[in-house]
Amino acid sequence: MSPPGSSAAGLDADRILIAPGHDAATVTEKISSVVFGRTPKWMFAVWAVGFALVMALLTQLAKLLFVGTGIWGVNIPVAWGFAIINLVWWIGIGHAGTLISAILLLLNQKWRTSINRFAEAMTLFAVACAVMFPVLHTGRPWLAFYWLLPYPNTMGMWPNFRSPLVWDVFAISTYGTVSLLFWFMGLIPDFATLRDRTAHRSLRRLFGFLAMGWRGSARHWHNYEMAYLLLAGLATPLVISVHSVISFDFSVAQVPGWHATIFPPYFVAGAVFAGFAMVLLLAIPVRRAFNLHDFITSRHLQNMGKVMLVTGLVVSYGYLMEFFFAWYSGNPFEIFAIAENRPTGPYKWIWMSLIFCNFLSIQLLWLKKVRQSPLLLWIISFIVSIGMWLERFVIVVISLHRDFLPSSWDMYAGTRWDWAFYLGTIGFFLCLMFLFVRFVPMIAMFEMKHLLPESKVKGRAKAH
Amino acid sequence: MDAAQERPAVYGMLAEFTSPQRLLEAVHRAKEAGYAAIDAFMPYPVEEISHEIADHKKSRVSAIVAVGAALGLASAFSLQYWISVYSYPLNVGGRPLNSWPAFVPVMFELTVLFASFAALGGMLFLNRLPRPHHPLFAVPEFERATVDRFFLLVKSDDEKFDYPSTRAFLEGLGPREVLDVDW
C-alpha cells in the first residue's frame, strides 16, 4: 500500500506529504470529486449501522426522560458512572482535532494539512456527543439551566462560580463554539471552490451562501491569514484549558485517587493520545475507501503513530506518578485506593487491561515497520481507544466504589441503558462523520495547494 | 444621467495568469506603472502577493481581536463579581465573596470566546463579506480563481485607468488573457 508514484523524482516515501505529479487543478478535482460524485454503496452500510445505534440512543433518551436517571447503574457510592466516563472520553477524542489544526499550525508542521479538516470535524462531533452526557445526567435538563448558565431567572438565583462543574459548562461550550468557528473559517475558501466548480444551480446557491462571496482577493487573504493564525493562537491554550478544567472536577474533590495535582497535564496528554487514536481509526479506512493515498501519505500515518507513542508514554508516566503521590502522601486512604484497590481489588482486571492497552500495546510503535503498516496502526488505535475508556472507568468508578468508610463500599456496573447511551453516541458520531465526508471537502483544498512546489514564489532582488 | 455618463464603461480589467510567480511580477510592474486601485486574486494565499497588494501594512484583524479579548475578560470578571458579591452572595467556607482566583477559568474561557468571534467577525467585516454579488462573478473565466488561476485586476476608478492604454499595458505583462469586467 505504498503511495503511487512515490519513487518518482527520487523522493523518499516516508518524507512526502503530497504525491508528485499533482497540480492545483488535480488537487481540487480529486478532493471535490468525493463531494460531487455518487455516494459509494459501502457508505449506506456505515449509515445503517450508525442509524441503528442512533435509534438505540433515542430509545434510551425517551426512557431516561420518562423514568429518570434511575435506569442507569449509578447509585451511592458510585454516583458518577458511565455518563462522566463517556463525557471525558469523548471530549478527549475531540482534542486531537484542535491539536492538529491549531498547535501544529503554530509549530509550522506542514504534515497537519491533509488531516486537519477531518480532525476538526471529529472534534465538533465528539463534543456534540460529549455534552449529551452531563446535560442528561442532570435528570431534567430543561430545569438545569439556572444553575449551569448565568441568566436572570424568576427565582433570582445564579450559578456558583467557585464550582468546577460551572467552569466545565463554560469550558466545554467555549470549546465547541471556537472549534466550530475555526472549522467554518477554514471552509470558506473551499466552499467558494465548490461554488465555482459545480454547474448545478441549487448546489451553486448553497455553496455560494456558505462561501459568503469569497473571491480569493489578495486583500481578503491578507486579513484571512492573520485571523486564522490568531484563531489558532487562541485555540491552543483553549484546548489545554478544557481538559484541565475537566480534570478539576476530580482533583478539586477529596476522594482518594482523584485528589492529585498531576491531573491536569495527565488528562491533557490522555486526551491527545485518545484523539490521535481516533483520527487514525477513522482516517485509515477513509483514506483507503476514497483512494486518498496521494494526500494522506505514509508520513502522515507515521507521524500520528509517533505522537501516539509520546503521549501514551506521558500518560503511563502519569500512572506511575499516581503510585508515587499515594506513597509520598503517607495518607492510608490514598495508598489503599491507588496501590491496593486498583491493582488487586475487585476491578483488578479492568486496571490490568488498562495497562495492557495504554502502556504495553503502544510499545510496538517504537518499530518503524509497525508505524509503516496502516493495519497495525489501526489495530493499536482501536486498543488505545478502549484503553482510554478503561482509564476513565478506573479513575471514576474504582475511586468511588470504595471510599473512606467500608460500610458504604459497593460494586458498580452499567445497565443496558448505559450501554445503549454509550453505543448510541458512537452511532451518532459515525453518522455525522460520514455525512461530513460525503458533503464537505474533507481535506482543506486551498491548504493542500499551498504545499505544491508551484506555489513557491521568488521575490524580487532589492537592487532591481 | 450625468453621473452614469461619467462612470467608466467597465468595472475594471482582469489579466489572467497561470502561476503565482507571474502574478507577483505583474503586481510589481503594475505598481511601478503607477496603478493604485489594483487587486490580485488567487486560489490559495501567497504571502508575497498579499503583502505587496496590502502595501506591506499589517492586517487590522489583530487590533479587533485584542478588543474582543479585552471585552471578554472584562465582562467575565464583572459578571462573576456582580453575581458573587452583590446579587447572590454565597458564603463558601468563610472565603471572601470576591474570590477572584476561582473566577479565572471562566475569565479565560470568555476571553477566548469573545476574541474568536472577533477574529472571524473582524475578518468578515474588513473584507466586506458576506457579499452575495460582485461584478467579478459575471466573468466566466473568473471561476477558476478559486481553482488554479491567478488574476490581476485594475479597477476603472484608478486615476491612471484609460481603456486602451490599460489594456495594452496588461497585454504587455504576458497574461494568458485580458478580460473586461462589466458592471
Image (cartoon, grey):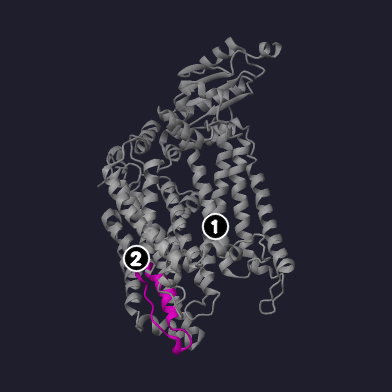
Where is residue B28? Give x, y as percent: 57, 25
Where is residue A333? Give x, y as percent: 48, 86
Q: Earlier in the sequence, mark 1 or mark 2?
A: 1
Tell me the SS state at disc 1. Answer: helix
Where is residue A344? Give x, y as percent: 35, 83
What residue is disc 1 on? A173
Q: Is residue B32 above or below residue A434?
A: above
Query: Could you tell whether B36 is left or right of A359 in the image?
Result: right
Residue at 49%, 43% (x, y): give it.
A186
Residue at 43%, 45% (x, y): give it.
A113
- Between A439 and A446, the one nearer to me in the picture: A439
* Identity of the residue furthest to the left in this view: A1
- The reply to the same-chain question for discs 1 and 2 is yes
Q: Which residues are magenta?
A: A390-419
The answer to the question of whether label 1 and label 2 lie on touching residues, with beta carbons closer than 8 A, is: no
Residue at 61%, 23% (x, y): give it.
B31
Badge 1 amino acid: Ser
Q: Chain of mark 2?
A: A
What residue is disc 2 on? A386
Residue at 42%, 40% (x, y): give it.
A448
Query: Could you tell whether B63 is left or right of A269 in the image?
Result: right
Which image quarter is the C terminus of chain A in? top right
Badge 2 amino acid: Ile
* Identity of the residue furthest to the front in this view: A66
Distance, label 1 to label 2, CA atoms, is 26 Å
Q: Chain of mark 1?
A: A
